[in-house]
Amino acid sequence: MNSKPHDGRGIAWTVIAACFGCAVCAGLPALAATPDTGTPAGLKQAKASNCFACHAIDHKVVGPAFDAIAKRYAGANAATLDKLAEKVVKGGSGNWGQIAMTPHPELAGSKARTIVAWVLSLHPGSTGTGSPTAENAKTYTYKGTDGKTVTLDYPLYLDGQPPKVTKEVFNGYLQFNSTCNRCHGDDAVGGAYAAPDLRHSLSGGMTYEKFLATAMAGREAKGMPSWAGFFTPAEIRDIYEYVKGRSVGLIPEGRPPSAQD
């Protein structure tokens, strides 16, 4: 989304993702727990930065999963870790894809090292909430105003039928019309700028993953900024659900009825 920021470019990332620095060795403070909560210092620092705008512990968001990074760099020597730390702070392209990671100068020094030490201490299945699989993903079927059946991978309506939308969809409406509308038009009808009509993008085959990646990474060449650190992945998901509902004709223009009504 062109104004606030989840397209054929692949989700791409640098040697290590948006939030870490390096140098893991025995006894690094990153693996220590903070005295007040017992939370690992690296996790606490990651949450204090914007790491979780583009990453999750056990599944890919925009950048790779933290446990996937830990697996790839298991046993990395000090020289490799120093190189990764420099990449985190300075940004650049790497071997996770084609979209360059933005610089993170605010993580220079001990902050980056603390985060990366925690990240590289992870292993698959050790933490995290996981994500739905094809086997357990639910689908929801609705009938559009034209009589055609529409199947979605999320619930659109609060009571399973119109008119009241879920709190997530309603939040998507609010978020979209507070920021995204500046370039993409009110109620996702398309804007006066070169920004695309997102209803057409989704009806044309844009997946949620591409939607999220575009929002978080931006499209600098087309004037769209990155929204990582402004919107959370959950907020982007809400926006997607709202726009998807608009694209299939199940949500009309204007404020949709919600639980608040």
Image: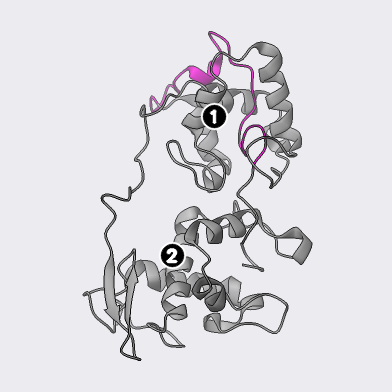
Q: Position of residue 230 (x, y in %)?
A: 59, 56
Residue 79: name its quadrant. top right
Depth order, front residue of 56/133: 133
> Please, is residue 53 above or below residue 202 in the view?
above
Residue 23 vs 134, above or below: the answer is above
The part of the chain drawn in magenta is: 13-38
Nearest to the observer: residue 97 or residue 36: 97
Side (left or right) of 86 relative to 40: right
**Residue at the spot 44% in from the left edge and 41% down from the top edge:** 59
Q: Is residue 148 left or right of residue 230?
A: left
Which numbered tag is attached to residue 238? Answer: 2
Q: What residue appears at the point 54 percent right and 35 percent down from the top-left corner?
A: 46
Label 2 or label 1, whichever comes before in sequence order? 1
User: Left or right of 255: which side holds 163?
Assistant: left
Is 248 situated above or below 76?
A: below
**On the rendered structure, is 157 left or right of 200?**
left
Q: Which residue is mark 1?
A: 69
